[in-house]
Every structure is written in structure tokens, then in C-alpha cells.
């Protein structure tokens, strides 16, 4: 258990990280196993799950940006002397490398003679790890820019966030394969089957940096419920704006793009993420202890992410549940499987901690 002497910060951050990664574990498990017969949007239960499933990636990315920037700004040193700069660049390289390794197209490492075109397409698609890796890199670059032009970093982070969000509707309509090789084109739009191109997804990581910077520079901010209230107000305003933004979208992008609800969804997601942060930060005010396993989950997000993906989707070296049971389970069997997966991931990090095996967090 963790004493409440540092609860203002540690509990809040660890709860957010643990919630984000466990949401991703259950979301992937349900998506892999639940039969199409039960995927009925008219069902309120499935509709709620589907909404939360869409929120999982923004929560995960926002939390990653918050944690990295928070730790980066805790070091009160100029950019050149901040050890977090080197750590951030190493983390960028590690995450991008692992992202491609998870989708490696052949178990023989160097023999690509039997790799199909579909396998190559899967390999070059941009996924969460590459996206967060680049998000960390952009946060480091943004911190450098902020220091050199002598602006508060939260302003620079906010501008870069808007850059990724507002350009998304335009850039995703461009066929980047006409201008770039497929491995690079996947970073700019979803036309190469990339799940998480930089636009708009990197915006969620950099947006998290705004909160992370604020937390680092205001160490006593959790001592009052005012912080949670302010987050909730901002979140509620963004959600309200998402329902009122269509005329502005139509003015900026034209009717065809505006009717696709691009910016509306982004505003809704950012607002919902802030509302969740408000709720968890408020709850943390009245919590003196949290179980050790919650902290361990939050500090082992990278390991949990990689292991659960290999179990569910497989890799070049092992088959996954998707290959064996794809979308063939009923509701209760799927729920049971999700609970088992969460239990396995929790048990794994507890055992690793007991064995004193040093593991790294996703973004530190």
C-alpha cells in the first residue's frame, strides 16, 4: 500500500495510467472474441461499450503525454541539461522499434521470400506504439521550442495540438501514396490501413502534455477540489462545443468534410477525457491508500500492452486467440475472457515485482 503523504499526485497519476491500460486490455479482448451476432448498436450495453472502446485510445494517449511531460518538467534544468531529453529520444526509438517488431512479417528474421503483400501492409501500418513514440518526440521538440522562444510550454503544446487536430480533416483526404513511400504515407493518413496516423492522434498525446506541464509546475494543485472542478468545466465546454461546431467545420472545410463529423468527434473525446481526469482527481482527494497492484499496473503499461497483444492477436512467432476463436464467443464467455485477461496481466506485474525484475513504463 502507498501512504497518502504523496496522494495528491501519485494516486491521481497511477489511477489514470492503470485505468487507461486496463480499458485497452478489456477493449481488445472483447473486440477479438465477441460474436458479430451480439454487436447490435441498438443494444444500450453494446452502445455504451462501443463508446468507451472509442475513448480508450484517446485516454491512453492523453495519459502517456501527461506522464511524460510531468516527469520531464519535474527536472528543473535547462533543456540541454535535462536528462529527460535523452530518455525521451531513447523512448521514441524504443516504442517505434517495438511497434514494428510486434507486426514483423516473418519468424525467420531475415528471410522475406514468403511474406505476402497483405503481411507487408500490416507491417508498415502505424499503430499505438509508433504513434506514442512520435508523440513523445514532438513533446521534447515542443519543450525545446518553448524554451528558445521564451513562451510557456503549455502554449506551444496547445498550438501543436491544434495543428494535429485541425489539419486532420484535410490531410486525411489526400492520397499520400502519390507523394510518399507507403511506410511514410501511413503516418499521414489512414489510407494504408494505419490505425493511428499522426493526424489527429498525436494531438491527444501533445494535449496530455498541457496537463502534465501544469501538474509539474503546480505541485499543490490537488490539495483543492477546485482543480477537479476546473477540469470538469473545461471538459463540459468542449463536449458542448462538439455539438455546436458543425457550422464552424462547414466554414473551415466545406460541407462534405463537415458532414463527416471529424472535429466534432475530437472535441467530444478530449472533453470526455478531461471529465474522466476530473472525476479521478476528485476521487483521489479522499483516498489515503491504493493497492500496490494498481501502482504496478500503471508503471508496467508497456509490458502489459505488448504481452496482451501477443496473446490476443499473435505475432510472427506465436498464434493468437484471434486466429483460434475470432468473433465466436457469446456475451458471458467474452466477459469472462476479458476478466481472465485482466487477471493475467495483473498477476504478471505482481510476479515481476516480487521477482525484482526491473521493467520500464510506457513513456518514462
Image (cartoon, helix red, strand yellow):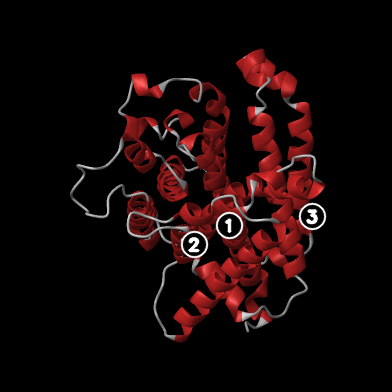
Say if mark 2 contacts mark 1, CB within 8 Å.
yes
**What SS does tag 1 mark?**
helix
Q: Residues within 10 Å of mark 3 (few under 14, many from 20)?
A: some
For the residues marked 2 and 1, what is the alpha-carbon distance in whole angstroms? 9 Å
For the residues marked 3 and 2, what is the alpha-carbon distance in whole angstroms? 35 Å
Identify the residue at horizontal 50%, vertical 64% (top origin).
301
- The answer to whether 363 is drawn above or below residue 359 in the figure is above
Q: Residues within 10 Å of mark 1 (few under 14, many from 20)?
A: many
Identify the residue at horizontal 37%, vertical 52% (top origin).
92
The residue mark sitting in front, 3 or 1, is: 1
- From the viewer's side, name the closer residue of 70 and 192: 192
Badge 3 is on which residue?
Answer: 229
Quadrant location, the C terminus: bottom left
Badge 2 is on which residue?
Answer: 308
Mark 3 or 2 closer to N-term? 3
Quadrant location, the N terminus: bottom right
Amino acid at each position: 500500500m502507498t501512504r497518502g503523504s504523496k496522494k495528491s499526485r501519485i494516486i491521481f497519476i497511477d489511477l489514470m495510467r492503470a485505468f487507461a491500460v486496463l480499458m485497452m486490455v478489456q477493449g481488445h479482448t472483447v473486440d477479438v472474441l465477441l460474436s458479430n451476432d451480439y454487436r447490435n448498436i441498438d443494444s444500450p450495453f453494446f452502445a455504451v461499450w462501443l463508446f468507451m472502446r472509442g475513448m480508450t485510445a484517446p485516454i491512453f494517449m492523453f495519459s502517456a503525454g501527461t506522464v511524460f511531460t510531468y516527469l520531464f518538467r519535474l527536472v528543473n534544468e535547462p533543456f540541454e541539461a535535462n536528462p529527460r531529453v535523452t530518455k525521451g529520444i531513447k523512448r521514441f526509438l524504443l516504442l517505434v522499434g517495438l511497434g514494428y517488431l510486434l507486426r514483423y512479417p516473418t519468424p525467420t528474421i531475415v528471410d522475406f521470400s514468403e511474406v505476402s503483400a497483405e503481411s507487408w501492409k500490416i507491417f508498415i501500418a502505424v499503430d499505438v506504439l509508433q504513434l506514442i513514440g512520435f508523440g513523445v518526440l514532438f513533446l521534447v521538440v515542443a519543450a525545446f521550442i518553448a524554451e528558445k522562444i521564451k513562451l510557456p510550454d503549455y502554449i506551444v503544446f496547445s498550438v501543436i495540438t491544434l495543428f494535429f487536430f485541425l489539419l486532420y480533416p484535410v490531410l486525411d483526404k489526400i492520397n499520400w501514396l502519390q507523394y510518399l513511400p507507403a511506410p511514410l504515407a501511413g503516418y499521414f493518413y489512414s489510407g494504408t490501413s494505419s490505425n493511428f496516423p499522426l493526424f489527429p492522434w498525436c494531438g491527444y498525446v501533445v494535449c496530455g502534455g498541457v496537463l502534465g506541464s501544469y501538474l509539474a509546475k503546480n505541485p499543490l494543485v490537488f490539495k483543492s477540489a477546485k482543480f477537479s472542478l476546473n477540469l470538469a468545466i473545461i471538459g463540459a465546454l468542449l463536449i458542448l462545443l462538439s455539438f455546436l461546431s458543425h457550422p464552424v467545420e462547414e466554414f473551415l472545410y466545406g460541407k462534405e468534410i463537415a458532414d463527416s463529423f471529424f472535429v466534432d468527434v475530437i472535441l467530444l473525446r478530449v472533453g470526455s477525457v478531461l471529465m474522466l481526469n476530473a472525476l479521478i482527481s476528485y476521487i483521489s482527494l479522499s483516498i489515503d491508500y491504493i493497492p500496490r497492484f494498481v501502482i504496478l499496473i500503471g508503471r508496467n503499461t508497456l509490458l502489459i500492452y505488448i504481452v496482451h497483444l501477443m496473446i490476443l492477436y499473435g505475432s510472427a512467432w506465436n498464434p493468437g486467440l484471434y486466429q483460434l476463436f475470432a468473433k465466436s464467443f457469446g456475451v458471458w464467455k467474452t466477459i469472462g475472457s476479458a476478466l481472465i485477461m485482466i487477471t493475467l496481466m495483473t498477476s504478471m506485474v505482481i510476479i515481476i515485482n516480487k521477482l525484482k525484475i526491473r521493467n520500464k513504463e510506457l513513456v518514462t
